[in-house]
Amino acid sequence: MITGHTRLLAVLGDPVRHSLSPVLHNAALAQAGLDICYVALPVPESGLGSILTALWDMEFLGLNITIPHKQAVMAHLTRITPEAVAMGAVNTLYRGESGWCGANTDGLGFMEPLRQWQGTRAVVLGYGGAARAVVWGLGQLGCREIHIITRRSQKLTVEAPAVQFHAWSEVEQYLPQCELLVNTTPVGMAPDVTASPLTAEQLHTLPPGAWVYDLIYTPRPTKLLQMAAAWGYRTQDGLAMLVAQGAAAWSYWFQRSAPVEVMTRSLEAYWQG
Ligand code: NAP
């Protein structure tokens, strides 16, 4: 029951209505018996600073930050964790003594399903917001060669070893030695579910035993993952990352672990309608 004592968490973004964070956090908060509600708030770029001040004054317990504010929010924080500084982006705000503090749980979320992965060479398709956390995570996992395939020339914004940028026309050179392929582009995301960033033939040049990880979580599986599974590669979709980045925020907000199973089931139930 929502009462006058109920505290609030929110995700700020623009657009933000598609966010699944309210689904997974509210299910987990209810299961944990916490008198806290999580909402999605549309925040235009021009309003970010004043809204953060207002939410601080209204005693919001914590916040998530999504597109397009993950970089801009850093100017409004009293402390930023070293991981978030290294990624150049913040997705989680928690209360400090005198103002909002920032962290980034996307990198940990990305790494979660890769605990068993033991390779050192990865190819990353795309270099947008999520790819920064991916590259940071790959560095943490001991990856020694990271080939980023991007449509435009890029500057590295994340500290990571042995990162090289390449054009899409060069992707085939790097697939035969690739032990982990990560799709960070939105190609293949609903509603464009028949699209894939690579052809079946290109995918089949990956070595046996390679992992194919698509950050997309709608649809499950994507066309890319369907083709990878058909060729016998190990596949991973974006659901575990989505849940793990949300669960990691609980350690900043409540200093406790989150009911990860409840979060996962809430999303599966949401998709099943
Ligand atoms: P973003 O900042 O817009 O970055 C997207 C990247 O994909 C950019 O580098 C862009 O390339 C590239 N790209 C877009 N369309 C392309 C195309 N047709 N061909 C080749 N490259 C293309 O988006 P984001 O926030 O990183 O999100 C990317 C995807 O990851 C989305 O599908 C999102 O849902 C998913 N995601 C999942 C999770 C999770 O928890 N599972 C978390 C975050 C994001 P250019 O730079 O060349 O324009």
Image (cartoon, grey):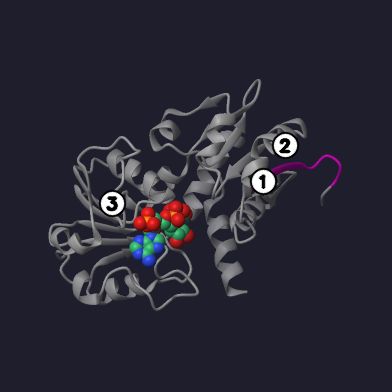
Please tell me which residue is depicted at 56% across the width and 49% down the height of the picture. 259
Residue 13 in percent (x, y) is at: 61, 50
Residue bounds of the magenta highlight: 3-11
Mark 1 belongs to which amino acid?
Ala
Q: How far apart are the alpha carbons under marks 2 and 3?
A: 40 Å
Mark 2 beta carbon near ligand 1 (under 8 Å): no
Q: Residue at label 3?
A: 116
Is 6 colored magenta in this rendering? yes
User: Would you place residue 41 above or below residue 160 in this image?
Assistant: below
Picture coordinates of residue 122, whole percent (x, y): 23, 52
The answer for how far apart the CA atoms under marks 1 and 3 are is 33 Å
Q: Which residue is mark 2?
A: 55
- In the picture, the disc for residue 147 is none
Is tag 1's residue or tag 2's residue first in the polypeptide sequence? 1
Which three-letter amino acid code belongs to the residue tagged 2? Answer: Leu
Count residues near mark 3 (Cα–Cα under 10 Å), then give few for <14, some for 14-19, many for 20+: few
Residue at 32% in and 45% down: 135
Q: Is residue 267 left or right of residue 106?
A: right
**Marks 2 and 3 in Cβ contact (< 8 Å):** no
Secondary structure state at the residue bearing disc 1: strand
Instruction: Report crowding for label 2: few under 14, some 14 to 19, many 20 or more residues within 10 A (C-alpha).
Output: some
Q: Secondary structure at mark 2?
A: helix
Q: Is residue 40 left or right of residue 87?
A: right
In the image, is residue 206 above or below residue 147? below
268 in relation to 29, above or below: below
Nearest to viewer (mark 2 / mark 3): 2
Q: Between residues 133 and 258, which one lies in front from this camera angle?
A: 133
Residue at position x 35%, y 38% in the image: 157
Q: Which residue is mark 1?
A: 10
Front disc: 1 or 3: 1
